[in-house]
Amino acid sequence: MIITEINGGLGNQMFQYACGRALAHKNKERLYIDTQSLINAKTTAEFTARPYELGIFNIQAEEMSPVLRSRFFSKAIPLKVLYKWILHYKIYTEPAFYFNKEIFEMKGNIFLRGYWQTEKYFKAAENIIRKEFAFEKKKNEKTLAL
């Protein structure tokens, strides 16, 4: 199973999802997204908290954080501890803002933390990513009014 941490604005969320989705596809694993950093974020003078925005697309991932927090653990357990020590995930943090091909060698349960801002992380799954970044077909009241 692959879990990718989602944070930042829409563009960052799209890169994070695309990287996780490509790795999940390559490894034939399910993809989950962790939105806890968005849920816990507070706007300050130096930081703007962002909402989860990937719901406008046809993405193929389930949200991990609320399920784990509500069913199994209290909010007091940091998910990083949960993933690494309880669920035995490899936590892979992007080492820098440049492409690192090491990610393609990873197998098993992986928790991704980073921004992954290059198409090299998801180029091999480009067709899948493009389809999933299409807008949802169903229209909500706001869309219909517009």
Image (spheres, rainbow, N blue to C red):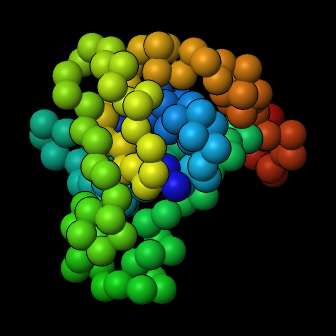
Residue 28's x, y, as percent? Answer: 64, 44
Q: Quadrant of residue 126?
A: top right
Q: Quadrant of residue 113?
A: top left
- The total number of labels drawn is 0
Residue 108 seen in render: yes
Q: Is residue 75 above or below residue 40?
A: below
Residue 8's x, y, as percent? Answer: 35, 37
Is residue 23 left or right of 140 when viewed as pictured?
left
Please state which of residues 145 and 74 is positioned toward the viewer in this rendering.
74
Q: Residue at x 36, y 19 (%)?
A: 101
Q: Residue at x 26, y 31 (%)?
A: 94
Q: Is residue 98 above or below residue 141?
A: above
Residue 105's x, y, as percent? Answer: 41, 31
Q: Is residue 79 above or below residue 117?
A: below
Q: Is residue 80 above or below residue 57?
A: below
Q: Residue at x 57, y 40 (%)?
A: 27
Is residue 81 left or right of 17 when viewed as pictured?
left
Quadrant location, the C terminus: top right
Is residue 8 left or right of 21 when viewed as pictured?
left
Is residue 17 left or right of 94 when viewed as pictured?
right
Residue 4 seen in render: no
Please state which of residues 4 and 13 is positioned toward the viewer in this rendering.
4
Q: Residue at x 25, y 39 (%)?
A: 93
